[in-house]
Image: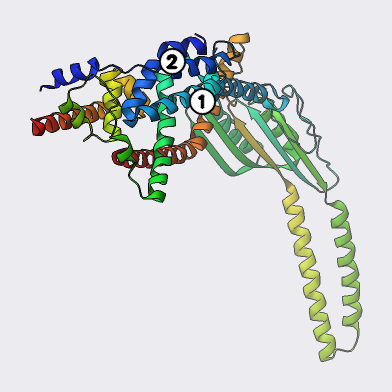
Amino acid sequence: MTFAQAAEAHLDDVYRYLAWFTGDRAAADDLAGETFERALRLWHRFDSDRGSARTWLCQVARTVALDHFRSERRRTRREELAAEHERVEERFVEGLSPDLEHALDSLSAGEREVVALRVVLELDAGTAARVLGISATNCTTRLNRALKKLEEALHVAA
Amino acid sequence: MSQRDLTAELRAARIDAPPELRERVRLIAAADTTPAPRRVFTWRRALVVALPVAAAVAATVVFTRPAHNPPTAAPGVQRGAVLGRAVPATPLQATIAPAPSTTRVQRYGASLTLRVPTADGVSRGVKSALAITASLGGYASSVHANTKGERATADLTLKVPRAHVQEAISRLSDLGTITAEHLDVQDLQASLDATGRTIALLQRQLATLRARPQTDALGAQIAALVARIEQLQRNEAATTRAAHYATVRLHLATPVPVARTTHHGALNGLRVALVWLGIALLYVLVLGTPLLAIGAAAFLIARAVRRRREDVLLSRS
């Protein structure tokens, strides 16, 4: 598989992952572009024996997203502005009920990330755990915790 | 809403990459000139190959170096310098004991090392040696015997009249195979002659002194001279007495089991190489384990810190 083939095949997955992870489609747009630029530079390190191209691209995307979160935190510290205010104004996912979309706001980035990997991208626990750099058990625990939190938020909203 | 419904709704809400991003990624991918990734040369793969190769090379070097094979003693040959006679590569066939002088006083010493096939042979040899010594008018001044399994040794110090020492050595040699022999003959006649002349001189001086008028000082001088003459006479007698017996040291021993050096061609080389490989791996384990433990601990700590920071970061975002 060439890089172009991998990029074409998994662009939507990477974009979805970043959109859920950041909760910001504009940021996901920029980060996806940056992800593929970085992936192109690192493509010689990709080993198909150790995982699929999708998993590898998600790992690269995660690194890019974490850098984004760090720079955002530094920026908000400097400007004393909550980045959240800029983000929550727009909907990053269409097709969700208003209650669920509101409930999603209660999740942290880490919880959104595991939901994106396990539910949206439908990765199995082992693959998602590899992207996150944690154990499969820990990954499942995080997912259950996030879904329970969503359920509770929906229950309160109802 | 159940978790099943929840996940179904989350999956149904699809987000697709916008066309602008898709175009941008296509442009990025178009810049790719590298071929499809192949198996890359990682340090793990390199170690998997390099470690066994290095160990095998080390084993080969150690195994094939010239100093590796120490010379092994052939059965029946005692190595080392032996005074009086060089040790041959084959067992000695006859003794080298010369006949003692009948006209001169000599200190005669000999040692024999004999190989005896069995432990019982050593025991019988001790008895025979004692019998031979007694039959020649001599005696044993010390006997030490040691038996352990099939291995036995015996050390005897025999005093044999000098006149019969050649016969004694000849008969003792028949108790086993000679593997080493040592002979030490020291002429004492010249020393005895010198002592005799000194005594004669002192006696003449004594006679002269006794012929003079006796005074206290002269009396003391005479007494000292007499004591000196008596001392020399005692020494002369002791030397003559000691020279009457020759000292024969006899060492009887069963053959030393020599390590078997079997060679089975290439397979034997392989076995030895594997042994050295095992030794090399053991060294690597012993020396490398603490370093590995420290490295692993550092890695785990760094990973825990990194995860903790990520958790903190993602819990706020």
Between A48 and B115, the one lying in front of the other is: A48
Question: A72 above or below A39?
Answer: below
Query: Which quadrant of the structure image shows residue A105?
Result: top left
Residue in the image at 85% along x and 56% along y? B191
Q: Amino acid at mark 1?
A: Arg
Q: Could you tell whether A119 is left or right of B282 in the image?
A: left
Q: Earlier in the sequence, mark 2 or mark 1?
A: 1
Q: Residue B91: x and y, percent?
A: 72, 23
Residue density around tag 1, few if under 14, some if 14–19, many if 20 or more, within 10 Å: some
Determine the chain carrying the residue at label 1: A
Q: Could you tell whether B114 is left or right of B106 in the image?
A: left
Residue in the image at 15% along x and 30% along y? A148
Q: Amino acid at mark 2?
A: Ala
Query: Which quadrant of the structure image shows residue B180?
Result: top right
Q: Which mark is residue A53?
A: 2
Q: Quadrant of the C terminus of chain B?
A: top left
Determine the chain carrying the residue at label 2: A
Q: Quadrant of the N terminus of chain B?
A: top left
Between B97 and B267, the one lying in front of the other is: B267
Between B65 and B9, the one lying in front of the other is: B9
Q: Are marks 2 and 1 in contact (CB under 8 Å)?
A: no
User: Which SS class for mark 2?
Assistant: helix
Between B15 and A35, the one lying in front of the other is: B15
Q: What residue is disc 1 on?
A: A38
User: Which SS class for mark 1?
Assistant: helix
Q: Which mark is residue B69?
A: none
- The answer to whether residue B29 is visible is yes
- The answer to whether residue B317 is visible is no
